[in-house]
Image (spheres, rainbow, N blue to C red):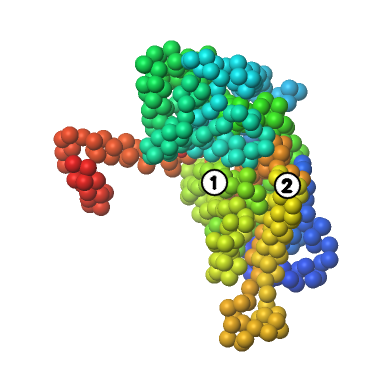
Amino acid sequence: MVADRAASQWNALESYRDRTSFDLRAMFASDPERASRYTFSAGDLAVDLSKHLIDDEVLRRLIALARAAGVEERAQAMFAGERINSTENRPVLHVALRAGPEDTFLVDGTDVVAGVHEVLDRMAGFASRVRAGEWLGHTGKPIRKIINIGIGGSDLGPVMAYRALRHYRHPDIEAEFVSNIDPAHLVAVLADADPAETLFVIASKTFTTLETMTNARAAKEWLLDRFDGDKSAVARHFVAVSTNADAVSEFGIDTANMFGFWDWVGGRYSFDSAIGLPLMIAIGPEAFGEMLSGFRAMDHHFRDTPIEQNVPALLALIGVWYRNILGYPTYAVLPYAQDLDRFPAYLQQLDMESNGKRVGLEGIAVGRDTGPIVWGEAGTNGQHAFYQLLHQGTSVVPGDLIGFLEATDDLGMQHDFLMGNLFAQAEALAFGKTEEEVAAAGIVPELVPHRTFPGNRPTSVILAPRLTPAVLGQLVALYEHKVFVQGAVWGINSFDQWGVELGKVLATRIIGELGATDPGELSHDASTNALIERYRNYRA
Ligand code: F6P
């Protein structure tokens, strides 16, 4: 078992923690080089790790842990196309989605790169026709609105990237993303849609997901209602992205209008596959290609850089230090960029669906904490909501502050105000304000405790020149590989998601009970029975 293999490295970390204090003020005072020594670069990203509660010895012991846990071998196995998703018996090859033509990625001895590029080329051809107004709707009008219907990995990546790359979008084509099974979501989006100019992208790896299929059927009915039931309209207004051609055709979408991907791409690792079709239509094949090159640059950094300088691995190991050794249960992602407002939600699925596991690869309880609770919000909004707790609460919440040197929108000094806030927050969290400093500022004694900041609240600062497609690709790949390394250290399978199944099964059963004319006796627990009864009585 991996955890056992690394037992002495875990012990070494714990014993070092017990005999060392990690005081950022003291560590900065004693080491004038700390900021530069702990700032690393990967692609266009400069990642300052100096405000973390680490020193050289912590890093040395964490790296030893990673090596003992077999992180490097597992990364090699991933890149080699081995079936490291053992509970689903699949390779994990999202890295092949951004392969260059010169690259080779083998699945069962067959190179998959040509297939990846074939789909990308088909996507590019289709996206270009839509963008040029050449793909016409049923009544001969060009498409002006894309409605992506998908959920989880078939939604969060595309919507996050669509928002992030606002400046690269086609001026006359907008995209909407419908995910929730709450009818409010689809109805609100359709309220503004002209069926003659709308293209639905039904995005589902399995093409069985309840939310997506329900919304897709409702969208099809909506369209047919407006075209007098003429089924030939579907071919002009619906395309699919899926691995399940049979289900796509059964739904009524011509598989000529289907863009495929492969079971070796996990849903939450898929937005650079055909799942990115709405994004490619919005930003164009060229910008999409730049995004892929950003992913690729980070893949190469991850694959080729020793752990000592490997930014995703270092971020991951520092996260392990906090989660397992210092006992901090959550991790915040705080992008100082409004266009990255859905980035925390995207990372929640990436991280928590991947590493929210309690059983290791051998099916035995891991015996230590695994994936942290990931959350966040775009700065500066978060500052006026929950940063109070970050600064003075009883829990230490480590996090990443992400910012850009160049503004995407020029409004005088406003970008300086934004970045000034980012730098200030990292400084205030790290160094706080002592009682002596507060008192010296003339604060009345009874208010001194209230106005004191403990500091020692760790953050990374991740800076990039500008929020471009390539930089977005680098950022996403950075976190994909971070999650990978943490999963490898914990010895879990980061690529299945059995934990979502029970709720799906129970929901299907309960939905039947809610609508049944003769529901019979309910046989859930007393609380669930009562909730169902209350709903049924009200609806009756
Ligand atoms: O929530 C479970 C899940 O399977 C995710 O892993 C996935 O991204 C999402 O549902 C959507 O799945 P699909 O793309 O098959 O509709």
Percent coordinates x, y for residue 95 in the rendering: 66, 32
Q: Are marks 2 and 1 in contact (CB under 8 Å)?
A: no
Does 411 sit left or right of 361 as displayed? right
Mark 1 element type: helix
Frontmost residue, 140 versus 533: 140
**Mark before the other along the chain sequence, 2 or 1:** 1
Frontmost residue, 148 versus 312: 148
Say few, some or many: other residues with alpha carbon within 10 Å of mark 2 (under 14 / 14 to 19 / 20 or more). few
**Can you tell which mark lies on residue 345?**
1
Q: Is residue 74 visible?
A: no
**Can you tell which mark lies on residue 263?**
none
Does 175 sit left or right of 56 as displayed? left
**Can you tell which mark lies on residue 410?**
2
Q: Quadrant of residue 445?
A: bottom right
Mark 2 element type: loop
Q: Quadrant of residue 396?
A: bottom right
Give the distance between the C-alpha atoms of the residues marked 2 and 1, in whole angstroms.
Answer: 27 Å
Q: Is residue 450 visible?
A: yes
Q: In the image, what residue type sits under mark 1?
A: Ala
